[in-house]
Image (spheres, helix red, strand yellow):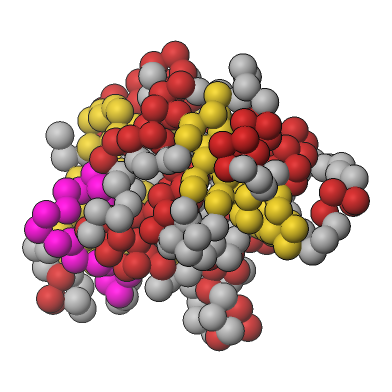
Amino acid sequence: MISVALLHRPRDLRLAEIPGFELEFDQVMVDVAACGICGSDLRYYHGENPWALHTLGVSLPNPHNIVLGHEFAGTVTDAGGFRQLLGKRVAVMSFKTCGACQHCRGGHENLCRNTTHLGHGAGWGKLEYYPGGMADRCPAWGNLCFELPDAMIFEEAAMLDVVGVGVHAARVGGVRPGVSIAVFGAGPIGNAIMQASRAMGASRAFVVDTYEVALEIAIKCNATAAIEAVEADPVKAIFEANSGACSVVFDTVGSVDTLRKGVALLAEGGTLVNMAVHDMNLTLNSLDIGSERSIKTSCNFLPEEFPLSLSLVESGQIDVKPWITHRFPLREISKAFDVALNKEKHGAFKVIIEPAS
Ligand SMILES: [Zn+2]
Ligand SMILES: [Zn+2]
C-alpha cells in the first residue's frame, strides 16, 4: 500500500492508502522527495480539466480517484530496465507522448492528443486509481527521468515542470535578445515566463499582479519592474517605464480585462500569448490587433525543453528558490491545499509537499 493525496472527486481531496502501482516495462519507481502544488492542481480540485482545455480544446470532466501531482522529483528505488538510474536523484518529466501521431512526428509533441500524464486522468484509459506525485512512491518513465546535478536540491528539481512551461511560452512568443516583454499574472507560471524571457535575452521584463508577495518575488527574480494592478494602470505604467510598447505580452490570467490590457500594450508586429484558456467568450475590437499583432496560446512544453529547463536552473539563469514559501508533509495535504487555495491569506507563492518527511 502507498499513501497518496487522492482527488476522489471534485473538492473531495483525501489522504488515502491505496495499492502500490506496478511498473510497466518502460517505467522506474520514484520515492518522491518533493512535489509542487500547481495552479492546474487547484483547477482539477475544482473539477476543471485544464489539459483538455489547452491541448484538446474541449472541456472534459475528470475521472474519479486521481492521485494529484505532476511537479516532482525523488530517488529511483526500482529501476526496471533502467539499471543506470537505480539510486539516482532524478527530476521527473510527468507526461509521455505517443511518438506516432502527426504532432509527435512533426516535432509538436506538446500537442499530442494521446499523451499519458502523471497527476491527472489523461491517456490512461479506465483505471481504479490514476498515479501522481503526491505520494510516497510514483512510477515514472525511465527515459523521462533526468539525473540531478549534485548542487540541485529536490525542491528546485520539482519546479522544472513549471520552468518548462515558461520556456515554451517564451519560445512561442518569439522572445529574442533586446526585446521588452510584459506578463499579466506573476504567479509561478508568470514568474517562470519572465525569467525564461530574461534568459533568452529580453532587456526589460515587466510583471503585473494584484498580489504583493508575487510582486516581491518577481523583483527577487530579476523583473525590471513589478506593477501593482489595482492602484496603477498597468498599461500606462509599463508604457512609461519602457518608453513604449512591448514586443511580447503574456497573459496567465485569461480574462477579458487582461486580454484587452495585454493587446493595448503590444507593439506593431507583437505577439500576445494567452496561457489560460477558459471555456468562455472573449470580445475584442479587431482594430486593436491590426499592424500584424497576433494572439497565440501556449500548451505545456516540448520534451527537449525539460532538460533545457534543468540547465537554466543549474546555471542560475533561472532561480526558483525564491518561489517556495510553504512545505508540508503528505499527511498534512488538507492544510497544504488550504494554503494553496487561499494563498493571499497565507502569504503563499509555491506550496511543496514533501512525502518523505
Ligand atoms: Zn503544473
Ligand atoms: Zn503523439
Say left or right for 307 vs 205: left
- The residue lying at 62 percent from left, 17 percent from top is 231
Picture layout, residue 341 above or below residue 130: above
Of the 4 image quadrants, the one containing the N terminus is: top left
The x, y position of residue 249, in whole percent, is 62, 49
Q: How many numbered markers are drawn?
A: 0
Residue nearest the viewer, comparing 348 with 145 = 348
- The residue lying at 41 percent from left, 36 percent from top is 218
Residue nearest the viewer, comparing 234 with 1 = 234
- The residue lying at 50 percent from left, 81 percent from top is 99
The x, y position of residue 112, in whole percent, is 58, 71
Picture layout, residue 230 above or below residue 91: above
Q: In the image as oriented, which residue stretches furthest toward the top?
A: 345
The x, y position of residue 182, in whole percent, is 57, 45
Place residue 238 in its image quadrant: top right
Q: Which residues are magenta?
A: 142-157
Q: Is residue 124 visible?
A: no
Say left or right for 90 vs 18: left
Q: Is residue 156 magenta?
A: yes
Q: Is residue 318 visible?
A: yes
Of the 4 image quadrants, the one containing the C terminus is: top left
